Image: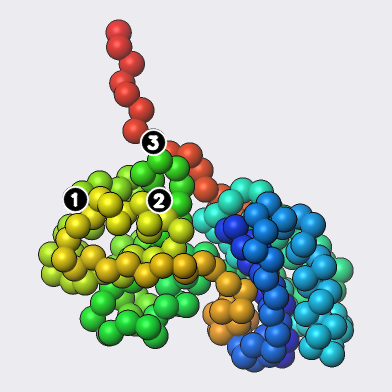
Amino acid sequence: MAILCLETSAKVCSVALHANGRLITSAEAHVEQSHATRLAPLIDDIVKLSKTDFTQVQAVAVSAGPGSYTGLRIGVSLAKGLCFALKIPLIAINTLELLAYQVRNQVEEDILLCPMIDARRMEVYCMVVNNAFQSVQPIMPKVIDSESFSNFLDVNQILFFGDGAPKCKGVIHHSNALFLDKVYPQASKMGELAYQKFESGQVEDLESFEPVYLKEFMIKPARQS
């Protein structure tokens, strides 16, 4: 079965076509703020390259955030439109889970994975999972300082990656802190996760589904009376 995957949560816009979880073809646009103009042409390109047509697409998977408000809105709107037109289900892929899934085979089993999405200043959205993809710390906003993740780092190595990780390099100096550069969410890596969700019936309601946008969060000083 063919699943069309759309990833628009970050700076790189990407699309891919997968069959039973395996990649058929993919394309990316590395020009910032080009999602609105590049997403639809990229979809047309990969459908033509795969020598298939939209009637053979059985589901659309889309990045569900956390991520850029504009990027997610563009991706989800187009994904919903395709699903309505083709009468096929929508599958939501959490961006942090996708990032962790992309690197899970690049590290030893006892290393924890911490995908990070840049929010603002020293703030990120992140989660911590083990190599079996089991949650150690759920998805949450976090203000990064020198003591961040110390409870985990004292007993485990943690691999930090994603566009929020670079800001941690100058702050977290623990010997168990590892960093992997240039990891960004890719539609070409979404296929297996999307296929698993489709097979287990984890599809979204087209009317009510909304992605998780990056919301501003900060510690506000108390008002002085």
Q: Circle 2 — which element?
A: strand
- Across and down, in percent, residue 93 comes to 57, 69
Q: Residues within 10 Å of mark 2 (few under 14, many from 20)?
A: many
Q: In this figure, which residue is indicated by the disc labeled 3?
A: 218
Across and down, in percent, residue 201 comes to: 61, 79
Question: At label 3, which amino acid type do we have?
Answer: Met
Residue 201 visible within the image: no
Q: Label 2: which residue?
A: 124
How far is disc 1 from disc 2 in space, using C-alphas? 15 Å
Counting residues from the start of the chain, the first of labels 1 and 2 encountered is: 2
Q: In the picture provided, is 179 more to the left or to the right than 53?
A: left
Residue drawn at point x = 69 percent, y = 80 percent: 26
Badge 1 or badge 3: first in the primary sequence: 1
Residues tagged 1 and 3 counted as in contact (Cβ below 8 A): no
Task: Tell which residue pokes out farthest to the top in this image.
Answer: 225
Q: Are marks 2 and 3 in contact (CB under 8 Å)?
A: no
Which of the two residues, 40 or 59, is positioned nearer the viewer here? Answer: 40
Name the residue that disc number 1 marks: 147
The image's colouring method is rainbow
Mark 2–mark 3 Cα distance, whole angstroms, equals 11 Å
Q: Residues within 10 Å of mark 3 (few under 14, many from 20)?
A: few
Q: Earlier in the sequence, mark 2 or mark 3?
A: 2
